[in-house]
Amino acid sequence: MTAGGEFTAALAALPGAGAARLGRLLGEDHAERAWERVVASRVDSSVAPTSVRREWALAAADVDPGSLREALERAEITATTWHDSAHPPRFTRDIDPAPVAFRLGALPDPSLPHVAVVGTRRASAIGREVARELGAALAARGVVVVSGLALGIDAAAHRGALAAAATPPVAVVGSGCDVPYPRANADLWHEVADRGALISEAPLGARPEPWRFPARNRLIAALVDLVVVVESRASGGSMLTVDEAVRRGVDVMAVPGSLRNGAAEGANRLLADGCAPVLGVDDVTTALGLDTCGAADRRHVSEAPRGLVGPAAVVLDAVDDGPTSIDELVARTGLEAAQVFALLAELELAGTVVHDGARVRRA
């Protein structure tokens, strides 16, 4: 834990202590000095209104920094301010800086390219697959995949980055680092922290209150060199991240989606407004200015496995990008229904296709 982390945790937990007030409070002081001023009721009026400063002094009287130090150590959480060398440098230089941060895990090399892969929580199966494949392909090429650890696209991108077992990912969350949210992603939360880093502005024990997530989205935009929207509705968290990226001059790209897919409306609107499309990982690495692989190593996000031949290849080729019915496969391949079912079973065992209700789709 960074020296003085307990005082950073104490400051972040003060009522009404948002990023702007914490920035003014810290100023040129380290966390311990700033905390001493709070306890002694010597906070300048330029930092916060009188009512807030009084509330801080009352709250500080009930805080034991020693207990906070023990809690940070038990949880293996690092607390930093912008005066600490371990503080994320992009948070300090940002137009809307984060003067305080909590971290679980180890930050990747800040000189590596960072890309946010974001989208809707109510993603389609295909959207989640594309996000997972992009996350894996980007991590394999030395890109730090950043997202918000939400359900849907965010989680899929992180799972893909972890599956690549290459460049560690970063998750920026809207609750305390000791409060996994959403609960369904608790396993992913811990895996990202173990193999990459999990970052938050929220103090220990902070619940995932709605107001924290727009603030979280600005931090995602601050960390990255590029934002990729896989599926997004016309409004929502991912579009707020896009807005924050635009404020910072960070490029935004989008994966095209079906016009019939409401979950892709926002992404398609971004494309109509002039954002560059993402049809594969090479589009992203080219936008980053990275060298692309040779043609033999390139992989489109919907590319079929190599080496597949015979009737199984015929059946797989007949499966659309979206769910395809068995009747459609029989008509397209000219094979008997029983043979199609048998070949689909082989393809499913190989992890090439999955059943989506009464239909089949590529995996």
Image (tube, rainbow, N blue to C red):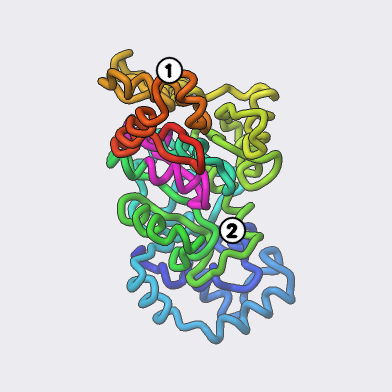
Which of 149 and 109 lies nearest the eye of the viewer? 149
Alpha-carbon span between mark 2 and mark 1: 68 Å
Asked whether 69 or 338 is in front, the reply is 338
The image quadrant that residue 275 belongs to is top right
In this view of the protein, can residue 289 be seen by the observer? no
Mark number displayed over residue 334: 1
Return the residue found at the far top.
295
Q: Was residue 135 drawn as part of the magenta stretch in this picture? A: yes
Q: Residues within 10 Å of mark 2 (few under 14, many from 20)?
A: some
Q: Is residue 60 above or below residue 233?
A: below
Q: State which quarter of the image contains the N terminus.
A: bottom left
Which residue type does callout 2 highlight? Gly
Say which quarter of the image contains residue 262: top right
Q: Earlier in the sequence, mark 2 or mark 1?
A: 2
Q: Residue at coordinates 38% horizontally, 59% vertically from top-left? A: 187
Residue at image coords 54%, 35%: 230
Rendered location of residue 186, percent (x, y): 42, 61
Magenta stretch bounds: 134-160
Find numbered disc 2 in the image and state the secondary structure of the residue it sits on: helix
Of the numbered discs in the image, which one, if any, rests on residue 23? 2
Number of disc labels: 2
Res 2 seen here: yes
Q: Residue furthest bottom?
A: 62
| Residue pictured at 63% horizontal, 39% vertical | 263
Q: Position of residue 284 (x, y in %)?
A: 46, 25
Up/down of 245 relative to 332, above or below: below
